[in-house]
Image (spheres, rainbow, N blue to C red):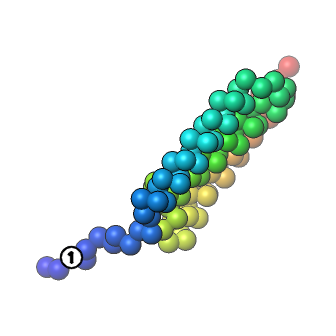
Amino acid sequence: MSQAAPSSEHRSSVRTYAYCLLALLLLSALALGGAFLHLGAFTIPVALALAGLKAALVASYFMHLIDQPSSNRVAAVSGLLLLLILIALAAGDVATRG
């Protein structure tokens, strides 16, 4: 029986991982600094946006989603859209309670 060798065609290099690490550290520092700023109603959206960017970097480079076929990307985006729909429904429920 012949088995196909696992594909190891990752475009990632040490430099890519270093840049990704620096970006994650920068975004973490921005999130920490944003916690001390009084942005009012924008505090939570800014924190969520920074967290989303960090999650996208981790999924793209450390989980090698950027090297995967488009069907895997569609599955990942579909899961995120479902999560956003569920969060919106929960927020609407909480907002309309008396």
Q: Residue at x 63, y 42 (%)?
A: 27
Q: Is residue 54 left or right of residue 97?
A: left
User: How many numbered marks, from 0 up?
Assistant: 1
Residue type beneath disc 1: Gln
Image-quadrant location for residue 13: bottom left
Q: Hey, which residue is sitting farthest bottom in the picture?
A: 2
Q: Hey, which residue is sitting farthest top in the picture?
A: 98
x, y (%) of residue 79? 59, 53
Q: Classify 23 as above or below 89.
A: below
Q: Residue at x 84, y 26 (%)?
A: 40
Kindly tell me whether residue 5 is visible in this rendering: yes
Kindly tell me whether residue 86 is visible in this rendering: no
Q: Classify 72 as above or below 90.
A: below
The residue lying toward the viewer, choosing from 75 and 61, is 61
x, y (%) of residue 36? 73, 23
Q: Residue at x 55, y 71 (%)?
A: 70
Q: Classify 97 as above or below 27.
A: above
x, y (%) of residue 7? 33, 72
Q: Quadrant of the N terminus?
A: bottom left
What is the secondary structure assignment of the residue under circle 1? loop
Q: Is residue 96 left or right of residue 48?
A: right
Residue linked to disc 1: 3
Q: Quadrant of the C terminus?
A: top right
The residue lying toward the viewer, choosing from 16 and 47, is 16
Assess disc 1: are there few (<14), some (14-19) or many (≥20) residues with their C-alpha within 10 Å of its C-alpha. Answer: few
Q: Is residue 78 left or right of residue 3?
A: right
x, y (%) of residue 65? 50, 61
Q: Residue at x 64, y 48 (%)?
A: 53
